Amino acid sequence: MSTSKLINLEHNQIKSTWNNNSIVKKSSPKIFCLIQLNEHLIISGHDKGIICGWVIGEDKLNLSTCAFTLNAHTNYQIYAVEKVSDISFVSGEWSKLGNIILWEIPENDEIGKVSSSKSFSLPTESKRIKLKEGVSVIKMVFSNLLACGMIDGTIIFWDTHTNQIRMQFEKHTAETRCLLTLCKSKYLLSGSRDKKFYIWNIEQRGLNSFQFNQEHKGWVNCMCELDKNTKFATAGGDTSDPVIRIWEVGNKSSIKSLYIHSEVITSLWFENGFLFSSSHDMTIKRCNPYEHLENEIEKYNTDVMPDRLLYIQKFSCFAYIAWKNSQIYIIYRIIK
């Protein structure tokens, strides 16, 4: 199995494997989601309707300074942010109003060099849409088409060019927890608190959708694609079902189960042939999802419940947030 080392980029010192957990930024109010917009910028969604942009520096992650702050969602929680392009993203709020807003960073802004807080003007009505339910997750399907998972389980497709809803899927009976596109956005996968997940044929407007076998005992909490092909992983969001299952498009039954956590699994990330998972058992683990052997699992112990893993390619490191906490953490890591 490949070996790995942790590198503290600030001091350029090699640390022992999986032992460096540095608090990079205390952000207030509470943080719910985290994405990388481009090589210079990370976006975070918070309580009280706040969205923050954090600079990725040339030699380190400079999360001590907020590049900008946005507040267009009143006091609602921002549960979902999603990249649209290198200079634009959308945010969705957890409220009965269900506001979704498209933000565009002015092209003449050298965002990687911003050192002080700034605010952008509120987008026009043509860059936002109001729905009847709150938004729990957003996934970009095409450059102008966004799949938005709602609190009531509905999935709507918002065309940001026309500001219209193109189509709507209605099979889940509880909150949509996760969305994933496969096969160059031909398919959309959706997981829910109703313990079910479906695959939808987007090209056929969801007409030939089908439900995978209900193997998860709790809700389907997170998903990730494996190797850019037809295989993917799902994880349970219940203490009775802390299991990662491997699936393949066209097969309603899972092809492999990984029992590597003891509590709720909060996020999955596939990188360089390895599957990374975070859990309320206060660990982040790495394994080969295809040749899984118990003694080859690498474990990183944390002092918090990690969530929303985000891989930063530039520095080969992971960022994550602490569940029920207002902190962003960084693991500096080189995968060899």
Image: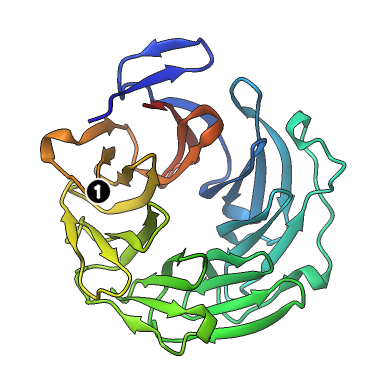
Asked if one can make out residue 283 in the rendered structure from this viewpoint, the answer is: no
User: Residue 173 is drawn in which quadrant?
Assistant: bottom left
Crowding at label 1, few (<14), some or many (≥20) Cα neighbours within 10 Å?
many
Q: Position of residue 149 (x, y in %)?
A: 50, 72
Image x and y of residue 53, in percent = 67, 42
Left or right: where does residue 250 sit relative to residue 71?
Answer: left
Give the residue at mark 1: 289
Q: What residue is rendered at 51% in x and 79% in y?
A: 202
Q: Quadrant where the N terminus lies?
A: top left
Asked which quadrant contains residue 287, the reply is top left
Front-most of 206 and 95? 206
Circle 1: element type: loop
State the image coordinates of residue 79 (x, y, percent, origin top left). 53, 59
Q: Residue at x 74, y 70 (%)?
A: 128
Between 264 and 207, the one nearer to me in the picture: 207
In the displayed orientation, state which residue is furthest to the right.
Answer: 108
In depth, the one of 264 and 167 nearer the eye is: 167
Say above or below: 284 vs 191: above
Quadrant that contains the C terminus: top left
Name which residue type carries label 1: Pro
Residue at (65% x, 50% y) in the render: 51
Q: Position of residue 321 (x, y in %)?
A: 45, 41
For the rendered model, the colour scheme is rainbow
